[in-house]
Image (spheres, rainbow, N blue to C red):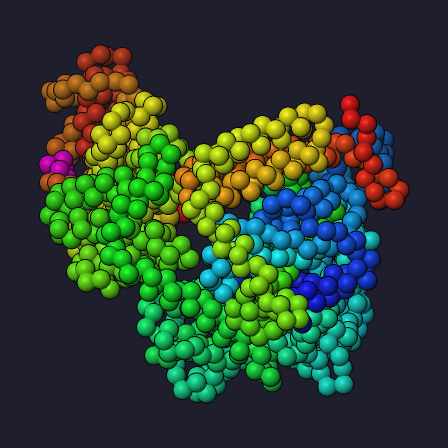
Amino acid sequence: MKSLPFVWEIGCEELPAGWIPGVLRDLKSRFGEQLDEHRLGPAEVETYGTLRRLVIHVPKLSERQPDRREEVIGPPAHAARTEGGEWGPAALGFANRNGVHPKKLTVFHTAKGEYVGFVKETKGQPAQRVLPAVMAATLRQLGFPKFMNWDAEIPDGRGAFPFGRPIRWMVCLLGERVIPFTIQVDESRVRASNKTRGHRFLAAPGSRPGRPVVVGSFLELKRQLKRNYVLLDPSERLKALEDVLARLEVKAGARRVGPLPGLSNAFLANLVEWPGGVVGRYPEEFSSLPEEIRNTVLIHHQKYIPLRQTAAFLAVTNMPGDPKQYIRKGSERVVVARLRDAKFFWDEDLKRPLDSRRQDLEGVLFHGVLGSYARKVDRLRDLATELSSLCGIAEQAVTRAATLAKCDLTTGMVGEFPELQGIVGGLYAREQGESEDVWKAVYGHYRPLGLGDEEDFPLNAAGVLLSLADKLDTLAGLFWAGEVPSGSRDPFALRRAAQGVIRLLLEAGPRLGMELALSPEELLERTFERVEQQQGRRAKDPRAKKLLEEFFAERLRFVFQREFRYDEVNAVFALGPLTFPPEELRRRLTALATLRGSEDFEALSVAFKRVRNILSGGSPGEVDPQAFREEAERHLWAAFRKVEPKTAELIAGGEYVKALRELSRLRPQVDAFFDKVLVMDPDVKLRENRLALLHAMQSAFTRVADLSEIVAGAEAGSS
Amino acid sequence: MNLQELIMALTRFWAKRGVLVHQPYDLEVGAGTMHPETFFRVLGPDPWKVVYVQPSRRPADGRYGENPNRLYKHHQVQLILKPAPPNIQELYLDSLKVCGIDPRLHDIRFEEDNWESPTLGAWGIGWQVLLDGLEITQFTYFQQAGGVELAPISVEITYGVERLDMYLQGVDDVYDLEWAPGVTYRQVRHRDEFEGSQYSFELASVELYRRLFREFRAEGARLLKEGLYVMAYELCLKCSHVFNILDARGALSVSERTSSILEVRQLACRIAQAYLEATVTAESGEPVTKEAS
């Protein structure tokens, strides 16, 4: 089959840089799928793009669809003929419905018998006629994190066409020929053509920016774009950016700080079409500002790259040069203005001892019913101290840190940079001579903020306890006050708080060697009680505590389901998600996940579903070995008696994998039992005895987790 | 270019392209978006083109006249084009050229920034336009206003006039800006910056403003019942400003903030509905009010 090269450029207004890799991948899959759907596939599809254009290149696209030969099957042959051997009504009706002359009917010999049918031959359409449908479907299916309405319609009969950003031009060529494709936008149209656009502000010599550039192929598109200051290929653009940054480092005489989370070179390369950059400097007086503050200004606000040990940074630009130094000067001005603000606050704030701000917290409202932050600090201090004495850790530091933890909320710095709360408190504490344990605890007590980031954790044990106490107090306090989050509203970020608590309990051991053998049940209980005590009354809603527990259990489930399968989580949670420390839940989940896929284990969980169903509602009795009649039940009991104590010992020692393996050894006996023994025997004694046996086994088997929850046949690992 | 020249240059640029030049709204508002010329005009099917200057009060941004970059009240040039022209980005860049900005010598970028006004039930998708790292314009395709999905889509372009002019004049302190030949920003505005800040942060009577919030809201609801959606919207704006003062005063807890925003938003959404029900498009594109029933 002949093939032609195909190129399609979707030119749009600036897309968010962070979207581009995902969108290009999605575009590639969708277009490939649509080619297959429309019988022009399979074909190699390549995608390229910048923040202003998405490009599909298919080096070899079939010139036309293959001809199709289908066998359309109708009624069974024996019913279709008359006695004379002519086609009967069934066959004629079938031919009629399909718009086919009866003489085209024939008999097919299928595996199911003989059927009347006809051969349908469809000639393949030329690609240029099919491509518009492929393109329309691709555009419809393309996913973006957020869509916008821009009054656009594609003439595919499906009406309004939201997209990531407005599309302003398109190039679409199959071989040399422009594929007709139009998007209607209000009263105007975007029509596919052979004209692209280069860089917004720069053009090839002899041309002008904004003037359309004619191209005849993908290679020409790439080449012409490069001449007009657009690097289409993301990997080329990344390389160009890295070269620019390396060159600027030499010029500045300093290396970049890195790696920078959230500001990778790949991301920076997607912010521009033609990577350029400048070195910016700021006055030395601002070097004394802590790095955290300088970096917030440079990295988070401006997306600039700080340089090591120098009062300077690199700014990525979309221009090859900076002839009048406007870009450098402009970027410096912005940075200096913000640093000046920060320095002003730093100096002003430090004029007062941090703990003197504690009384100011009376005037900062935490919650209408719960009161001011000063009251929160009271609860926080008491709870944190209690937790630290329960764990035998750093009591004095924790108490002091709790007193200081929220004082930075009244500082000018946090007023200006709210994202630095906690960090600023820690820095001020350090500056004012607090001990390392104390300032580090304050510094890190808002962490973890999420679930994904390795670095996102308190710096020390005191910080962990403070963070725990703060999050628990927020949870208990707000639930007590009736602020229960819903599916769509969680204005106090209680989900995040609960997830933070869970993460702290799971990771404080491995990371900081802390032993926090505290169950959520106990923690929530203590915290809730403390709120009631301070507020002087119970919660208005008597279910408040229950709701809090359910909420927390749901968050535990959420966290664990990121790593384990839902049925594994169900199995372990059946024992009570809040009664064990999360670490303990994790050990059991790990054991289940490890044994998953082992045949014996899976077979046993099937058996135990059966056991659960048989036993539902009954009460256990005593097993009387004398009352057994069948070999199979005797063997099962004997095997169980041998395995059970061993298992119990292993469980007591926390060796769950070994315990479950041990239990799995009962598989042959369990299978034989169910094969040969009728549990619900009409003889009462036999029946009750067998039920008692099953009860004994069930309670042994559910000591690690409720194995009847495991869904057989599933693969190991998380879903 | 001094401040008044900049404002006139931008206004004239759009006036030449057939845009109606309106005037600032005569109530306290936090942004040009809140002006009825934006709030009402973006609703419904009728096209509209308007530009105006809007002094915008943001009590929480007050710095007593001492911060070179932050103002209690700054000025915006607000543009609404409905529907959005297909070459709107290019037109905008041309408007920068009349301010003396040669894009070949700068790094001008459209950086993702979506905008939301919870009190007005409005949000949009667009960018902040950066001029060498400085944000000078908010460029937004309105998606929703008053809780209503919009069609056609309006584009909103909001120039931050002081910021832009500080850049053009090469001045690091807003108060040093030349407003008119020989007259500085300081001379024109310093006293009201100071008093505005002191009032919002320290002296505003919390009791009075809480009462005003309740009463303005009730009055707004009452006017709406009478079918007076324009006047009801004025009361809504008053609520919004009162909220801003209470917020700057630190008088609102997180939950009070949330519930107050919700209340203003509910009123704004009902006003939007009333407007849509009452207006009918005439041939000329001018909304014609139905008889109030």
Vertical arrangement, residue A11 with respect to residue A327, above or below: above
Q: Quadrant of residue B76?
A: bottom right
Res. A34 in view? no
- Magenta residues? A642-648
Vertical arrangement, residue A172 with respect to residue B53, above or below: below
Q: Quadrant of the C terminus of chain B?
A: top right
Q: Is residue A618 magenta?
A: no
Res. A694 in view? yes
At horizontal 77% and vertical 61% (from top left) the residue drawn is: B14
Vertical arrangement, residue B194 with respect to residue A475, above or below: below
At horizontal 13% and vertical 51% (from top left) the residue drawn is: A396
Q: Nearer the viewer, residue A459 or A9?
A: A459
Q: Quadrant of the N terminus of chain B?
A: bottom right
Q: Is residue A643 magenta?
A: yes
The total number of labels drawn is 0
Q: Position of residue A94 (x, y in %)?
A: 80, 35
Q: Position of residue A717 (x, y in %)?
A: 36, 50
At horizontal 50% and vertical 73% (from top left) the residue drawn is: A333
Horizontal side of A485 relative to B286 (left or right) equals left
Q: Nearer the viewer, residue B68 or A495?
A: B68
At horizontal 75% and vertical 51% (from top left) the residue drawn is: B22
Q: Position of residue B133 (x, y in %)?
A: 54, 70
Q: Position of residue A77 (x, y in %)?
A: 75, 35
Q: Nearer the viewer, residue B209 or B278?
A: B209
Q: Nearer the viewer, residue A459 or B280?
A: B280
Vertical arrangement, residue A416 with respect to residue B152, above or below: below
Q: Quadrant of residue B147?
A: top right
* Main SS class of the magenta portion in the image: helix
